[in-house]
Image: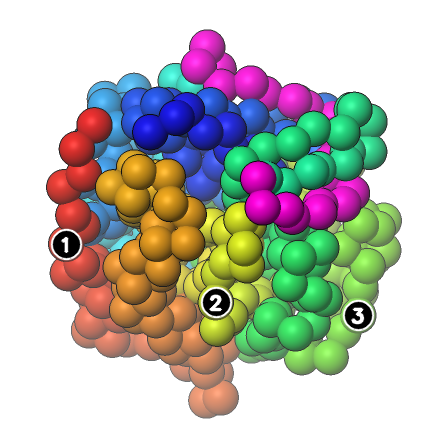
């Protein structure tokens, strides 16, 4: 197989994971990332089932485990701060949990010497031909690649350019969430506290060895239209939505106003009939976002990267055969996770106002551990 060049849009999780595997199979990879540097913020993410196996095959298990949050569980309280439930550690953090920024850093360090990283740039157009894809960038000079992979998240730029508007594939589950860093002013010891407020919830949990914390705000909002690029408008929306609530909400809103790593988005799923078109293929949330409520986004990214790279190698670079095999291998796994994402989104703010009971939570948590068995690909 002649060494093929692959452009990957997105340098968070799916993109670098794919670059690691493609390098082992002899491909040349370039990653283009809109952000000027690695994104260090974000929520905690966990690994379950087959994703742990893939992480070990990558040779990164120990490096990632060094950043394990070691969470012990979460207390659920009401607006008066009274305990109403306890959630076990495995529901929160799976078999291994790290902060998203820490995982991104591990993946970058594992690939930066073997892949070309281009930060502060983005794809503006692609023209496919018999011999490759000519790509134009916002900043850099045009280049031609054999293949292009959109690993650029649920709001994928590559998907928009090749497959059409996001509205054709994005399905709103009626929830909004925000995550931002905070001081660990409650002195939480590897624990979290979730406050249920009817159709809203607030959360804070310790991070980085209890030296800091992450806070989250969640609410139903089936019809709100807040510009995802307007941080000030997003903060105003949340301040108005949570005004007058008890527990630690006033203090969290104050912290939110001054944080510089605020992230806000809707809880959406991406559903597509096909993940490839010609020489372009989508990976991770860009192709099959299951919604953050599923807890399976990281797992899908890592497993998908492993399978896509393996199928490209097995097909000796025949992208049409590889893309078809990739979809065949991943479809059932994705469908299972997306169903779970919808169920958990519906249960987060149940109509009767009551949280799922312990057995109910445990049953849904068990579904997160997929029985999928991935192929062994030869490196």
At mark 2, the secondary structure is: loop
Left or right of 338 on screen, residue 225 = right
Q: Which residue is mark 3?
A: 225
Q: Is residue 124 magenta?
A: yes
Question: What residue does disc 1 label?
Answer: 373
Q: In the figure, residue 166 lies in which quadrant?
A: bottom right
Q: Where does the image place residue 204, in percent across and percent down from the top left?
A: 51, 46
Which callout, 1 or 2, points to the residue nearer the camera?
2
Categorize mark 3 by other alpha carbons within 10 Å: few (<14), some (14-19), many (20+): few
Magenta segment boundaries in residue numbering: 112-131
- Asked if marks 2 and 3 touch (Cβ < 8 Å), the reply is no
Q: Residue drawn at (43%, 75%), measured in percent from left and top? A: 342
Disc sitting over residue 39 in the figure: none
Is 342 rendered above or below residue 97?
below
* Element at label 3: loop
Q: Is residue 294 above or below residue 352?
A: above
Indicate the secondary structure of the residue bearing disc 1: loop
Mark 1–mark 3 Cα distance, whole angstroms, equals: 40 Å
How far across and down, in percent of the image, does residue 194 sit?
Answer: 46, 57
């Amino acid at each position: 197989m002649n060494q093929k060049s692959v452009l990957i849009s997105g340098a968070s999780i799916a993109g670098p994971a794919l670059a690691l595997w493609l390098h082992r199979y002899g491909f040349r990879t370039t990653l283009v990332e809109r952000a000027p540097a690695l994104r260090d913020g974000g929520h905690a993410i966990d690994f379950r089932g087959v994703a742990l196996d893939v992480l070990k095959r990558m040779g990164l298990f120990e490096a990632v485990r060094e950043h394990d949050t070691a969470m012990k569980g979460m207390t659920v309280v009401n607006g008066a701060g009274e305990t109403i439930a306890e959630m076990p550690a495995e529901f929160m953090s799976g078999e291994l949990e790290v902060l998203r920024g820490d995982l991104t850093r591990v993946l970058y360090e594992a690939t930066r010497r073997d892949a070309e990283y281009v930060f502060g740039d983005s794809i503006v157009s692609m023209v496919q031909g018999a011999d490759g894809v000519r790509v134009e960038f916002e900043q850099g000079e045009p280049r031609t690649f054999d293949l292009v992979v959109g690993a650029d998240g649920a709001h994928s730029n590559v998907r928009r350019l090749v497959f059409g508007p996001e509205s054709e594939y994005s399905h709103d589950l009626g929830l909004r969430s925000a995550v931002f860093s905070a001081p660990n002013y409650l002195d939480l010891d590897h624990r979290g506290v979730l406050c249920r407020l009817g159709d809203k919830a607030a959360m804070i949990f310790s991070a980085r060895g209890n030296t800091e914390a992450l806070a989250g705000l969640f609410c139903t909002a089936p019809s709100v239209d807040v510009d995802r690029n307007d941080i000030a408008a997003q903060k105003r929306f949340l301040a108005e939505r949570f005004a007058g609530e008890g527990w630690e909400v006033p203090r969290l809103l104050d912290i939110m106003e001054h944080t510089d790593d605020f992230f806000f988005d809707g809880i959406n799923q991406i559903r597509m009939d096909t993940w490839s078109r010609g020489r372009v293929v989508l990976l991770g949330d860009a192709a099959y976002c299951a919604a953050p409520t599923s807890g399976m986004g990281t797992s899908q990214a890592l497993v998908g990267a492993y399978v896509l790279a393996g199928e490209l190698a097995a097909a000796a670079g025949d992208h049409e055969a590889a893309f078809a095999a990739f979809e065949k291998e991943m479809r059932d796994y994705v469908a299972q996770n997306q169903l779970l994402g919808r169920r958990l989104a519906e249960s987060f703010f149940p109509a009767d106002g009551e949280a799922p009971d312990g057995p109910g939570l445990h049953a849904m948590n068990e579904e997160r551990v997929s029985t999928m068995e991935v192929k062994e690909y030869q490196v």
